[in-house]
Image: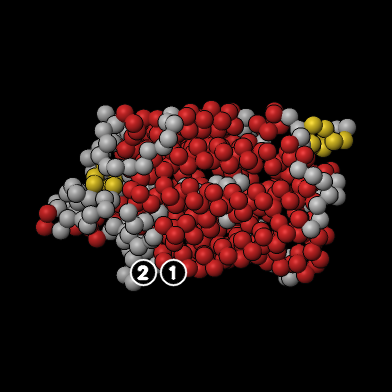
Amino acid sequence: MTDSIILSADEAVSPVDAERKLARVLGPGTAVLLVLSCITPASSLFIIVPEVLASQGSGAVATIVAGILVSFAVCACYAELGTRTASSGGEYAMVTQTLGKGAGWLTFALAAIQLWVIPPIIALGTADYLSDLVNLPRAITGATVMLLATAMAILDVKSNALVTGIFLGLEIVAAIVVTLLGLTHIQRGPAELITPHVVGAHGLEPFTLGMLISGLAVGTFVVSGFNTAAYLAEEVMDPRRNVARVIFTSLGLGALVILLPTITTVLAVKNIGDLATGNFSQFVHDWGGEGVGVAINVAIAIAILNAVIVMVLQNGRVVFASARDRCWPAAVNELLTRLHPRFKTPWVATLAVGVPGAVLAEAVDVESLLGITAVVLALMYVVVAVASLQVRRLPATVASWRMPLWPVAPLLVIVAVGYAVCGSSRSDLIATAVIVALAMAYYVFYLARRPHDRFTVFDPADEPSPTPTQAPALDRA
């Protein structure tokens, strides 16, 4: 038994809770568009992949493939837990149900760092890719992108799926263009992918297993974003069946869009040593000319906006869920659970994510926090994997998706991702430890002392909520 309190929609909820459920309006195809937009394959291809190429040489392909394989194992954990607990709380709701409230709150604290830090980091890259057309102040442009994304995220979720789907189409076109350009400039055969090389102190050197392991964390980060499906589970139709489909389909498509251009680039550069520059945009300019290079850069800027829209949208739902689950004082819970009268979206919670993100982009060196967010993301994956080990020991309350070959996937995640965490910088590990300590202090001194009216994680079922006459109010001042 765990010490979690999971309220299903069949149990007594307050009239306010009954009104503050998100509507199930997303089919699996629409949900895939949103999740794939959060993976944002084009921006991963042009922002993260160049770093992998610079450090891993032609071994970057093997590193990214390894990261994708680990990510599929992570997906299996998310799919099993996410079909069991279909809540917009995402990871913290899933972990609370399986490991208890203490572990659930720790997971929320880890997720919260990403809620406010990652979107402005991504948004800051917009000005860099528009520089061929216009010189824009980097910080102000990042803040503006955050505010635009926040305004979009307040619209109804189906409208956002349409907009992000259009933007996603442009991203995929850009990736296809890069792939075709690479294919028309092939310099070497596929043997380079089997026995890759990296630039070392004495020129080209063989790529080793140790090099692959050292780059595994970044290789996994290339396709991160599939966990958005867990945050949207409350709005997905028939989540017990569709959430797993959305997770695996999104990762598979995102991996394909990223991997194919990476392969053709490795085979098309004039010299393997050129990969050390990490200048993907320059490769495209060389192959396609100035016009094509500028067009691709504009597509990347659009991809960044697309990713930030979905991130703000999903992160606002996590904040909304935390307030509905009574994680904060009553007045804060009341404010953050308000839904827009027309769009039925958590507009106050969305503003609570987007506006601070704009401030961070404009006033703080938020990019210096990227190392910490990588450690936090890795730790959260480990906690989710531990939860997926525990879930089979609990009574099955719903017919959820069950991963094949259990427990291979969660054990692989714990070993591979845990190793990556141990290899992180000491300063990032210390900063993460401080964050965890502060979060657990809040849990011990506030939430744990109010076990029946604080942090009562709500698990929306497929059925409608009870009528108000069936439900007593649970919240207290």
| Residue 84 located left or right of residue 385 | left
- The structure residue drawn at horizontal position 58% and vertical position 28%, both measured from the top left corner, is 419
> Going 81% across and 66% down the picture, which residue do you hit?
289
Residue 156 spot, x, y in % from top left: 40, 67
Mark 1 element type: helix
437 above or below 351?
above
Residue 123 in view in this figure: yes
Report the residue marked by disc 1.
159
Q: Quadrant of residue 362?
A: bottom right
Instruction: Relative to 51, say whether 445 is above or below.
Output: above
- Residue kind at label 1, given as amino acid type: Ser
Q: Nearer the viewer, residue 307 or 119?
A: 307
Locate the N terminus and report the quarter of the image it occupies: top left
Q: Tell me where residue 400 appears, x and y as whole percent.
A: 33, 42
Given residues 75 and 1, the one toward you in this image is 75
Name above or below for residue 38 compared with residue 453: below
In this orientation, does residue 477 appear?
Answer: no
Please provide percent x and percent y for residue 351: 44, 61
Q: Are marks 1 and 2 in contact (CB under 8 Å)?
A: yes
Residue type at the position of mark 2: Phe
Residue plotted at (55% across, 46% down): 224
Colour scheme shown: secondary structure
Q: Which mark is residue 422?
A: none
Which residue is situated farthest in the left direction here?
Answer: 469
- Which circle's residue, 1 or 2, is located before the other in the chain? 1
Specify the label residue 343 is tagged with.
2
Count neighbours of disc 1 (C-alpha within 10 A) and say few if under 14, some if 14 to 19, many if 20 or more: some
Q: Position of residue 355 (x, y in %)?
A: 49, 60
